[in-house]
Each structure stands twice: as C-alpha cells, then as structure tokens.
Image (cartoon, rainbow, N blue to C red):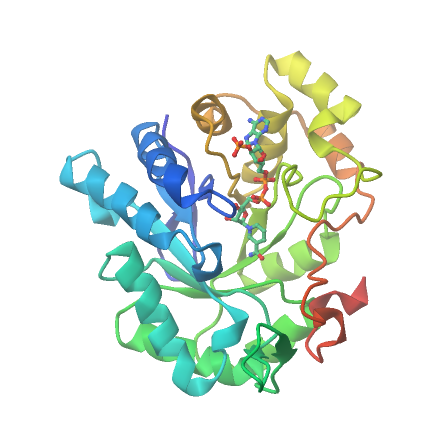
C-alpha cells in the first residue's frame, strides 16, 4: 500500500506517511529502511544529529539498485543541526549529509530549530548559544535551492512569531514546517497559521515518542489512551493507526519511527479507512498542551530564539 501525498507550493508531492529515524541504531536502520520501502514507504525523515545517515543511505540505495524504486519516487528529508547555523557552515553541513546518504540531491532540507549553538571556547563538550540569526542561516539554505542541491527547504520547531518574521525576510518561502503534533498537543493556532500561509506540516513524535530518553514515569502514554484505543476498535485498527490517520486525513504528514518489522508494516496500513468527523473532533478534544520535546538540553530554554516561550 503506497502512502497518499500532499502537494507543496513548489508543486512537489510529499508522501503523507514517512519513516522516522531518530534513535534508530546504525546497526538496525538499514534493514528498517529497506523493509519500509518494500512496504510502500516513499518518505524517509533523517537528520545529521541522529548519527545514522550512512546506513539510511545504504538502505535507500540498495532498493534503488534492486529496481524496487527510482530515486525520483522517493522523498528524502534531512535537517541542518544547530551547530551549523553560521554562514560558512551551512553548505558543508548539507554536503556532509548528502555524502553520508550517498545521494545527489535532497527533496527537503529543514533547519532543525531556530537556535544556533556552538561548542564552548575551551573545546570541551559543553555547548553554548550562538548569536547567529536564523534569517541569515535561511539565506544560506536558499542558496542550496538555487544550486539544485535540494528541491525545497523548510523549518522545524519554529513559533508562529518566528515564522512570521522569516516569511517577511525570505526570498524562498518554507515549504514545510516539522513540529511535534499529536492529540495531546494539537497546536491549533500554529496549524491554522501554516495552512493560511500555504506551508504544509509534518507531525513529529506522532505516537508520543514512547522511547524518548527524557521520559518521566508520571507522564501520560499516548498509545495507551483509552479514547484512542476505543476509536481504533470501531475500525478494527490499532491505536497507532488511529493516531497516524488523524494527521494524514487533514493533510498533515506524519513520520512515525520504528525498527520493528510488524510495526513498520502496521503504520502504513492507514490509507484503507477514514475516521468519522465526530472521531476527528474527539481526538482533537484530547489536547492537553503536553509537549514532549521541550528542548531543555544545552541551556536552550534561555536561548534568545527559544521557540516555546509562547506556550
Ligand atoms: N524535528 C524534530 O525536532 C524532531 C523531533 C523528534 C522527532 N522527529 C522525527 O519524528 C520521528 C518520530 O518521532 P519519535 O521518534 O520521537 O517518536 P514516535 O514516532 O512517536 O514513536 C516511536 C516509538 O514508537 C514505537 N512504535 C512505532 N510504531 C509502533 C506501533 N505501531 N505500535 C506501538 N509502538 C510503536 C517505536 O518502537 P520501535 O522502533 O521499537 O518499533 C518507537 O519506540 C523521529 O524518529 C524523527 O524522524 C523530529
């Protein structure tokens, strides 16, 4: 079963269901990518900071060489990490990703967050904020489009105010905004704003990121939500499938991560049913503004471009 697509303002079609790869170990991600492609996935969500782009590239290329897919059938996405926001660092960071993935272009390149950082002067592991403005970083990303190295550029983890500022300064508009989205964090204002501006959304952590390293025992478990479970039973679907269908039904892409064969297959079996209008409203009503990824490491909450102050 192939995933349905959403059209970006560039005219490109982005598959609504993609494979997430954060915390997919280098030793298991190649197999996961190959199995995903064999089962209809055409969108792979990568990032330099996940440390596994070489193995993901090996998986994609093995399926191209086998004739299962052509490069142009795939929608490959990666992200510029915070350490590489300086003008002279953007292109080398992009090229590193392209080399690791062993590809000649990307379909979409995100700025991973608006917050530039750098290693501490003493060259220790400590990270500190940098003053670089995300507008200046964006201008370098625009050049990657000019050079034909990437088909579209986007942002991730921006606030509405930051998007507004970027839109007033950019030459090439962001095509996609990747943010945390699920029924416990529905972000209606942000979603409406992006829709109004013609920016497509990708939902990250759509299953509630159960294996996140900073998980606390007193936090809710989205996949165990009773209401989500009950809705699934009515359609003969799992909670994961309901959580993913909720996004794609409204034109929001979702990138669930999995390295488990049965779950990789399960997560794309969402294009053979529709949630009723009432169920969509019920899911939206579960919102509790519960943000999983607060970006609380490296002193980022004090960064001048910390995006979640509006919460
Ligand atoms: N832009 C950003 O700042 C940002 C931040 C976070 C994430 N992301 C992207 O979004 C992707 C997804 O987010 P995420 O990794 O945080 O979490 P997620 O996709 O919400 O959850 C992944 C977890 O759910 C498990 N899982 C997958 N399918 C399942 C199913 N059908 N039933 C039960 N459990 C299932 C996975 O287990 P197994 O792997 O063991 O199968 C894994 O532990 C990331 O991998 C990354 O690509 C982007």
- Examine the image and state in which quarter residue 231 appears: top right
- Seen at 57% across and 64% down, the residue is 197
Q: Specify whether 271 is left or right of 285.
A: left
> Is there any visible trace of residue 306 in the rendered image?
yes
Q: In percent of the image, x 30 and y 59: which residue is there?
A: 100
State the count of labels.
0
Residue drawn at 43 percent across, 53 percent down: 46
Q: Which of the two residues, 142 or 48, is positioned nearer the viewer here?
A: 48
Give coordinates of residue 106: x percent, y percent.
32, 60
Q: Measuring 80% from the left and 67% from the top, which residue is drawn there?
A: 310
Query: Does residue 243 lie above or below 293 as drawn?
Result: above
Q: Locate the C terminus and report the quarter of the image it occupies.
A: bottom right
From the viewer's side, name the closer residue of 6 and 181.
181
Residue 274, percent across and down?
57, 25
Position of the N terminus, as image quadrant, is top left
Q: Position of residue 217 (x, y in %)?
A: 80, 37
Q: Position of residue 259 (x, y in %)?
A: 46, 33
Is residue 73 among what the camera can see?
no
**Where is 51 relative to 272, above or below?**
below
Q: Quadrant of ligand 1?
A: top right
In the picture provided, is 118 more to the left or to the right than 161? left
Q: Is residue 297 above or below residue 280?
A: below
- Nearest the viewer among 230 and 57 is 57
């Amino acid at each position: 079963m192939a995933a349905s697509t959403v059209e970006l303002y560039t005219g490109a079609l982005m598959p609504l269901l993609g494979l997430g790869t954060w915390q997919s170990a280098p030793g298991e991600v190649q197999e996961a990518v190959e199995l995903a492609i064999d089962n209809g996935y055409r969108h792979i969500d990568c990032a330099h900071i996940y440390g596994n782009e070489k193995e993901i590239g090996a998986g994609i290329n093995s399926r191209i060489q086998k004739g299962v897919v052509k490069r142009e059938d795939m929608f490959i996405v990666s992200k510029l990490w915070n350490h590489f926001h300086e003008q002279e660092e953007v292109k080398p960071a992009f090229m590193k990703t392209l080399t690791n993935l062993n590809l000649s272009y990307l379909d979409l390149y995100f700025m991973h967050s608006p917050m530039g950082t750098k290693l501490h002067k003493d060259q220790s592991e400590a990270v500190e904020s940098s003053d670089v403005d995300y507008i200046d970083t964006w201008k370098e990303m625009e050049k990657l489009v000019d050079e034909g190295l990437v088909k579209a550029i986007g942002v991730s983890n921006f606030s509405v105010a930051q998007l507004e500022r970027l839109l007033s300064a950019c030459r090439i508009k962001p095509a996609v905004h990747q943010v945390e989205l699920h029924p416990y964090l529905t972000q209606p204002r942000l979603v409406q704003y992006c829709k109004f501006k013609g920016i497509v959304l990708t939902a990250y952590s759509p299953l509630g990121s159960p294996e996140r390293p900073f998980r606390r025992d007193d936090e809710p478990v989205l996949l165990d939500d009773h209401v989500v479970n009950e809705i699934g039973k009515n359609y003969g679907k799992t909670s994961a499938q309901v959580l993913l269908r909720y996004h794609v039904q409204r034109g929001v892409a979702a990138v669930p991560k999995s390295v488990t064969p049965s779950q990789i297959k399960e997560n794309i079996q969402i294009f053979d049913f529709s949630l009723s209008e009432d169920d969509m409203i019920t899911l939206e009503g579960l919102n509790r503004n519960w943000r999983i990824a607060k970006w609380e490491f490296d002193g980022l909450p004090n960064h001048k471009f910390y995006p979640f102050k509006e919460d």
